[in-house]
Amino acid sequence: MLEAYKISYSHKKHAILHNIDISVNYGELLVIVGPNGAGKSTLLSLLANETGKNEEPIFFKKKTFEEWEQMELAYNKAKFSQNNSHDIPLSCKDVVMMGRYPYFNANPNQKDHEAVLKAMEETDVAHLENRDYNLLSGGEKQRVHLARVLTQLDNEVLNKLVFLDEPLNNLDVLHQHRILHTIKNFTKKGNTAVMVLHDLNLAAQFADRIMLLKKGQVVAHNTPEKVFTPEIISKVYNFPCTVCPNPVNNNPLIIFGT
């Protein structure tokens, strides 16, 4: 689904990423983790073709982004950013409808309205459809923007790709798990998701593969049980931890400070 090699990036002569190779399979959920300043969001933006340009081409479905037509790309790829505007003078439904802009010229049709309602129900904001977006809490705004991204990819295209940068910010535990299950179900249909998370236990529970970054370099890229070991985590985060099997699914359960 996605291939890139020798990804490097610098800003004002400050090196942020160093020669990263990455490949993500169809139907896979890859979670990028690492300490603050590791380069996670920068890597995600580069992979999504939104920041700078890598010297080596990035391939999405065997084509470079330059080979895609913009409208076709909008049906195949979407990105959720962690920094969304907090001042949008629209109703919640109208904000979510922004995700349908590639599908109509002037007025949305019935299918667009149905896609918006479906996404809002999925993220538990359907009851807020007529509310002023600016009056929502931080968590509610987060879920509205997640619905906007989901509705953009509501189409008949096979094997779609979504990038998500810290999608769980401001969400309570119920909605964190609800959103992660939504993303996991998305990948089970042959689609792919690349997501940045800070919560290592949620990453271990839901990810198919983990990429662990530190200071712009890949420390480990493998399944959760192979990446999340006490030795690797303690070294990267400079903080002691214990790793034991999660009693629910036997994935790694990380306990810090022990």
Image (spheres, rainbow, N blue to C red):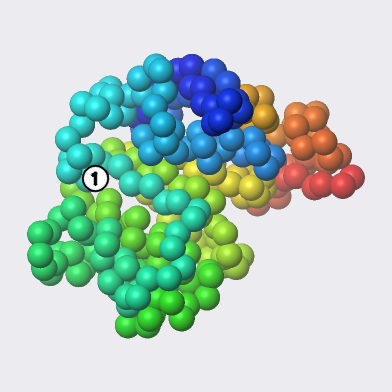
How far from the left and from the top, in percent, is residue 151? 29, 58
Residue located 58% across and 46% down the image: 197
Residue drawn at x 48%, y 22% as measured from the top left? 7
| Quarter-of-image position of residue 26 | top left
Q: From where the camera sits, is residue 80 visible?
A: yes
> Looking at the rendering, which quadrant does residue 154 occupy?
bottom left
Q: Amino acid at mark 1?
A: Ala
Vertical comparison of 95 with 37: above or below: below
Picture coordinates of residue 67, whole percent (x, y): 21, 26
Q: Work out which quarter of the rendered image holds the C terminus and state it.
A: top right
Residue most extreme to the right: 258
Residue 67 versus residue 252: which sits nearer the camera?
67
In the rendered structure, the answer to whether residue 155 lies left or right of residue 80 reads: left
Could you tell me which residue is drawn at 42 percent across and 36 percent down?
51
Q: Which residue is mark 1?
A: 74
| Residue at horizontal 65 percent and vertical 39 percent from the top | 37
Q: Mark 1 falls on what kind of element?
A: helix
